[in-house]
Amino acid sequence: MLFSAFQPAMLFHSSIRKELARSFVATLVVLITVVMSMMLIRSLGLAAKGSVNPRDVIMLMGYSVLGHLATIMTLSLFIAVTNTFGRMYRESEMAVWFASGRGLAGFVSPVLRFAWPILLAIASLALVVWPWTAEQSQKLRSQYEQRGDLERVSAGQFQESASGSRVFFIDATQDEVLPGGSNAASNGATASSTAGKTDTMAQLTAKQARNVFISQIEGNQQIITSARTGRIETINGEQFLVLGQGQRMEQALQNAEVKISEFETYSVLIGAAKVQGNVSAPVKTLGTLTLLNQPTDVNLAELSWRIGLALAALNLLLLALLLSAVNPRAGRGLGTAFALLGFVVYYNLLNVGFSRIATGRVDFGLWMLALHGGILLGTLLWMAIRHRQWSWHHLLRPRARSNALPAA
């Protein structure tokens, strides 16, 4: 007797979990493919604008997809539950289970047994992996943006410096390693700045260039320098541009006075861009424990987003059971569109909470309790009504009968 009663329960749980697993994997693969394509296009756009290194496009795309994997898995789980139970409603399979004594609340157990590893993974991705991927992406961008001005130069292209005061152009380049005994950067305009440095301390790596053009603004003067040859030399951590066989034109911006001079060798101290240590890191790159230890408004807003992703996954899982109920005679797309609308509204509320908490207009604890607690309470109440099959007709029927009784 016990085995005969236990066997239908096993069949009930296993059939639902298997179908949920198939739907979840298929949806996850499709969504990851779509997001990878979108992130690849975005990364290529950043590389085309010079924001990231073209060699780091694939790595940046991987970090972006991994950072958004929590949202992708939440949406995949939501769609899997909605599609699975929507099919069961359309094919009257749910009516069979209801007729056998299974209420809607009886489906919560198999769904949670299937989804708890996914919910745990979503929480880990939101609290741990998301700040790590954001930090790695920020490092890739910062390293490329904070490179030296001369490292930005590409042959055949006009390139603006980081400060915007110089424009470089070279016709062609050729790398060449110079012996450590020359100190050509001590000639010309920077001779005084490099005086006293011994040749043995100078470790030089030169990039030979042909037909160099530099336009820069210094004070009230526009300086245009052109040379037949040029090379980049690094001496004790400082970068120099050494030009040969060229001319320099200085023109005052306030009048038409022009000064032209020719030179055989001219050196310009460029200086490599260095990372500034006092620049605060973006809030999304901070660890979750750091956000808890530093409860500022911005940090609490980021914390509400991360915790909200985990809580939203659980609420949306329960909400999908309710939103998947469709009329078998109705179209398939209407129920799916309504369910996706609920998903979009929930995630938009997460963004609204982030902005309001960051500006200090809403308390962190009050918002989390009102949003996630309110949705959970409303979902459980709605599920209880559906499980007991309550309706306004059943609630009003006893009153209608009492009014219909004849007076004594």
Image (tube, rainbow, N blue to C red):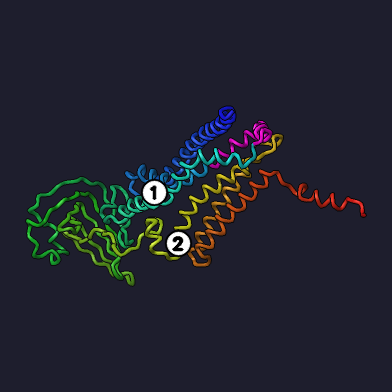
Q: Earlier in the sequence, mark 1 or mark 2?
A: 1
Is 99 situated above or below 48?
A: above
Residue at x 37% of width, y 49% of height: 133
Q: Which residue is mark 1?
A: 129
Identity of the amino acid at label 2? Leu
Nearer to us in this view, 15 or 240: 15
Q: Is residue 281 left or right of residue 347?
A: left
Crowd class of label 2 (few under 14; some 14 to 19; many from 20; radius 10 Å) = many
Identity of the amino acid at label 1? Val
Q: Which residue is mark 2?
A: 300
Q: Could you say whether the residue bearing mark 1 is in a helix, strand or loop?
A: helix
Quadrant of the snapshot with the N terminus: top right
Residue at x 35% of width, y 60% of height: 281
Crowd class of label 1 (few under 14; some 14 to 19; many from 20; radius 10 Å) = many
Q: Main secondary structure of the magenta part?
A: helix
Locate residue 9: give its quadrant.
top right
> Residue 245 appears at what percent x and percent y?
17, 55
> Residue 36 appears at what percent x and percent y?
44, 41
Q: Could you say whether the residue bearing mark 2 is in a helix, strand or loop?
A: helix
Nearer to us in this view, 42 or 241: 42
Quadrant of the snapshot with the C terminus: bottom right
Segment tinted magenta in the rendering: 77-101
